[in-house]
Image: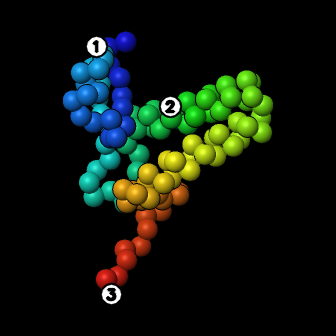
């Protein structure tokens, strides 16, 4: 493997220096609102979805499905809290949000 893709959250010198593999950071456009297809972005996003599912299934195998559900819910709560704390926007679906009028 000679090239790896990373989400914009992994931009910076630490990630580039930590691996012998060349890392290409996949970012969305600065003016993007809502969903837009970006080359290779879906690979990164599907990876995160897969890794969360695999992590939860590992817990289910060791500790049971009920504890796995709680663990995945707590992990998602941490992700949502981080999004809330740094002001990230989440948009469900393909439609862009209507601009908010200034008061």
Residue identifier under label 3: 103
Q: Which label belongs to residue 47? A: 2
Residue 5 in the figure: left or right of residue 66: left
Mark 2 neighbour class, 10 Å CA radius: few under 14, some 14 to 19, many 20 or more: few
Quarter residue 89 falls in: bottom left
Q: Height in image: 48 above or below 32?
A: above
75 over 20 or under it: above or below: below
Where is mark 1, residue-wise?
Answer: 20
Quarter of the picture holding the N terminus: top left
User: In the depicted view, which residue is nearer to us: 35 or 19?
Assistant: 19
Mark toward the start of the polypeptide (2 vs 1): 1
Q: Tag 3, which secondary structure?
A: loop
For the view shown, which residue lies furthest in the left direction?
13
Question: What label sits on residue 96 in the rendered view?
Answer: none
Q: How far is the residue under mark 2 from the one under mark 3? A: 41 Å
Residue sitting at x 73%, y 23%: 62
Determine the residue positioned at 52% across, 48% down. Answer: 78
Q: Secondary structure at mark 1?
A: loop
User: What's the CA distance linking mark 2 and mark 1?
Assistant: 20 Å
Q: Residues within 10 Å of mark 3 (few under 14, many from 20)?
A: few
Q: Position of residue 96 (x, y in %)?
A: 43, 64
Q: Determine the image quadrant of residue 71.
A: top right
Q: Give above or below for 77 relative to 15.
A: below
Asked if the residue under mark 1 is in contact with the one under mark 3, i.e. CB atoms within 8 Å, the reply is no
- Separation of marks 3 and 1 at Cα, in angstroms: 51 Å
- Against 1, residue 92 (above or below) is below
Local SS, label 2: helix
């Amino acid at each position: 493997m000679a090239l790896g893709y990373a989400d914009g959250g992994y931009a910076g010198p630490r990630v580039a220096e930590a691996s012998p593999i060349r890392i290409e950071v996949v970012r969305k456009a600065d003016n993007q609102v809502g969903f837009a297809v970006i080359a290779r972005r879906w690979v990164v996003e599907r990876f995160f979805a897969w890794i969360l599912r695999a992590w939860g299934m590992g817990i289910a195998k060791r500790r049971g499905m009920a504890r796995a559900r709680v663990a995945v819910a707590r992990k998602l709560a941490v992700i949502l809290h981080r999004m809330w704390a740094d002001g990230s926007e989440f948009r469900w679906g393909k439609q862009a949000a209507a601009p908010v009028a200034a008061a």
